Amino acid sequence: MSSASSYTDASAAASSDKLNISANIASVKQRMEYAIAANDREAGSVRLVAVSKTKPLELLVAAYETGQRYFGENYAQELMTKSTEMPDDVAWHFIGPLQSNKAAPLVKTVGLNKLACIETVSTIKLASKLNRAAETWNEESGSDEKKKLGIYIQVNTSGEDSKSGVTPGAEVIDLVKQITEECSTLSIDGLMTIGAPGDYTCFDSLAKCREEVAGVLDKDPKELKLSMGMSGDFEVAIAKGATSVRVGSTIFGERDYSNLKK
């Protein structure tokens, strides 16, 4: 096959992928709107986080061109790389396990102006590292306005050993109190969970945790976000009160981990 022909085929494939991304996002948003309306919730009350882990930059750009601005990444190195290549108005959610030694480089590279949230905080050790990284970023930014880094507490609502997060109840409350007392540059903005497949009581459990955490923080529960629901169950999550859903494969297709940089 000639090089010109190969280029044409590659261009056609890229164009097809972009069209698919646009159609997929439109479909997901329509399904979200139906779920919101069916449960008498306010229009626009649920955020779509497009989970783009392992996906090439051109697919993120295609999603961005549809108006999508919230993207979720699972790996620190991948997020750091993509954040320098995507427009500055993208708001990044980190949704994977984060080693404490990656906290400083992640915050430094992405910056508090683009890092919307770390959704997977479940230890005071990680919270402390993120707090110090956020303090350093503020010091080096030269701005008089001190920015806080938004975090969600990850809660293991399923009780599965394979899942990260603190146990609902006393463990969540204790961690929230510690972070509030020791980490002044962090803002506890909500809770996150990865429920067990088909077990929607996990979503109920997270909603209950929100009530308890709101009491500790002296906030209206509605001020705290609930990040729950993925490609296979985001409509159920919306019915259970999710304010943010993390949708990946339904938008971008199946993932390829062969060239992954963590």
Image (cartoon, rainbow, N blue to C red):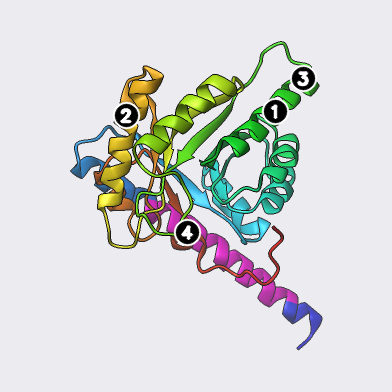
Q: Which residue is mark 3?
A: 139
Number of marks: 4
Q: Which residue is mark 4?
A: 251
Q: Is residue 238 visible?
A: no
Looking at the image, tell me whether mark 3 or mark 4 is earlier in sequence order.
Answer: 3
With 249 as the anchor, is 98 left or right in this view? Answer: right
Q: Are marks 3 and 4 in contact (CB under 8 Å)?
A: no
Which span of residues is magenta-colored? 7-28
Residue 132 is labelled as 1
Q: Residue at x 48, y 32 (%)?
A: 175
Question: Please, what is the three-letter code of the amino acid marked with disc 1?
Answer: Arg
How far apart are labels 3 and 1 at the CA level?
11 Å
Looking at the image, tell me whether mark 1 or mark 4 is earlier in sequence order.
Answer: 1
Residue 212 is labelled as 2
Above or below residue 89? Residue 229 is below
Q: Are marks 3 and 2 in contact (CB under 8 Å)?
A: no
How far apart are labels 2 and 4 at the CA level?
34 Å
